[in-house]
């Protein structure tokens, strides 16, 4: 499976992106009118981006990348899906943006991009598509300038232990074998979608040790009992924009964020 996962996931993300782009979940209409798609969680650690060079890994069709640009950054977004990159360029041209988008596997980026950045950013639904977290961390570190900042927000690994309706623990917390699933997607409009996906679970210790191992100091780690996205089944909006799994209450971690700095 390891030698085929990129082709399988690329095909899946290409299909998903076609639908996501027109979904009310992503709501491009309000985005084009000026809505910033970033959440309080990452905004709190991103700080002042004015004039900063930001590399956004796994940017999907670019809403967050373009939102980073709206905050004053010079942005580069990277994604495996050629459909996502095509749509990102459509959004960028409609906004008269200077954003650059590159279609590439995260692991192959060093071969096509020879620059350093002030900030590397990646968020929500990213590392689960990557088998080797040490390799991912080495990419993050490679592209950061000395003292550059790493800003990361991700679904909590505990969430991925459960089956779809959160009625039982189905997967190990720890990185083990590839998880192969036939699934729909998390936006509206994807009810009839059925694509094959290959993913991996990555525990917090695995992620943190990988970052430490490549010289990134962890300055802040937070865990949250809600998701800023309504992307799971059986959710309840406990406060505007804060979703929990109803049957779990506020007992389980849904999201975490990491703010790191590359050693000088
Ligand atoms: C859930 S999206 C994350 C982006 C962001 N949270 C959003 O909703 O816009 C995951 C993205 O990761 C991309 N992706 C998956 N595997 C990848 C890889 N190996 N290299 C680069 N991008 C990858 C997919 O194409 C998809 O666009």
Image (cartoon, rainbow, N blue to C red):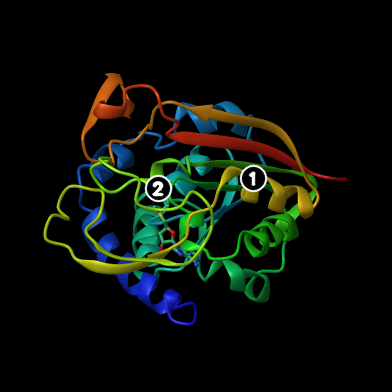
Residue at 52%, 63% (x, y): give it.
130
Counting from the top left corner in percent of width and height, residue 250 is at 37, 21
Counting from the top left corner in percent of width and height, residue 149 is at 71, 42
Counting from the top left corner in percent of width and height, residue 9 is at 38, 70
- Circle 1: is it few (<14), some (14-19), or many (20+) Cα within 10 Å? few
Q: Is residue 25 left or right of residue 48?
A: left
Quarter of the figure that contains the N terminus: bottom left
- Rounded to the nearest angstrom, the CA distance separating label 1 from label 2 is 15 Å
Q: Is residue 179 left or right of residue 55?
A: left
Q: Secondary structure at mark 1?
A: helix
- Quadrant position of ligand 1: bottom left
- From the viewer's perspective, is residue 165 above or below residue 86? above
The answer to whether residue 90 shows anywhere in this view is: yes
Residue at 43%, 50% (x, y): give it.
125
Say if mark 1 contacts mark 2, CB within 8 Å. Answer: no
Res 160 label: 2
State the image quarter where residue 116 is shown.
bottom right
Counting from the top left corner in percent of width and height, residue 27 is at 25, 42
Residue at 20%, 52% (x, y): give it.
22
Q: Residue furthest left?
A: 192
Quarter of the figure that contains the C terminus: top right
**Number of numbered discs present?**
2
Q: Secondary structure at mark 2?
A: helix
- Circle 2: is it few (<14), some (14-19), or many (20+) Cα within 10 Å? many
Residue under circle 1? Answer: 205
Point out the tag, 1 or 2, that comes first from the N-terminus.
Answer: 2
State the image quarter where residue 16 is shown.
bottom left
Q: Is residue 141 left or right of residue 197?
A: right
């Amino acid at each position: 499976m390891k030698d085929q996962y990129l082709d399988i996931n690329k095909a899946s993300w290409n299909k998903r992106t076609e639908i996501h782009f027109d979904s009310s979940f992503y709501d491009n209409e309000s985005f084009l009118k000026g809505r910033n798609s970033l959440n309080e969680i990452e905004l709190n650690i991103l700080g002042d981006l004015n004039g900063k060079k930001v590399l956004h890994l796994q940017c999907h069709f670019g809403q967050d990348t373009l939102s980073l640009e709206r905050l004053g950054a010079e942005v580069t977004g990277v994604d495996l899906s050629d459909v996502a990159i095509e749509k990102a360029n459509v959004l960028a041209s409609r906004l008269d943006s200077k954003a650059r988008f590159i279609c590439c596997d995260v692991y192959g980026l060093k071969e096509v991009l020879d620059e350093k950045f002030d900030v590397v950013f990646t968020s929500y639904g990213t590392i689960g598509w990557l088998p080797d977290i040490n390799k991912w961390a080495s990419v993050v570190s490679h592209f950061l300038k000395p003292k550059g900042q790493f800003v990361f927000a991700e679904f909590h690994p505990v969430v991925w232990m459960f089956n779809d309706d959160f009625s039982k623990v189905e997967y190990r917390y720890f990185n083990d074998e590839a998880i192969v699933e036939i699934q729909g997607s998390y936006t509206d409009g994807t009810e009839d979608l059925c694509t094959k996906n290959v993913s991996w679970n990555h525990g917090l210790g695995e992620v943190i040790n990988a970052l430490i191992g490549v010289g990134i100091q962890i300055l802040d780690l937070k865990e949250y009992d809600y998701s800023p996205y309504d992307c799971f089944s059986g959710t309840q909006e406990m406060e505007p924009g804060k979703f929990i799994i109803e049957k779990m209450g506020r007992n389980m971690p849904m999201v975490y964020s990491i703010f790191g700095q590359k050693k000088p």
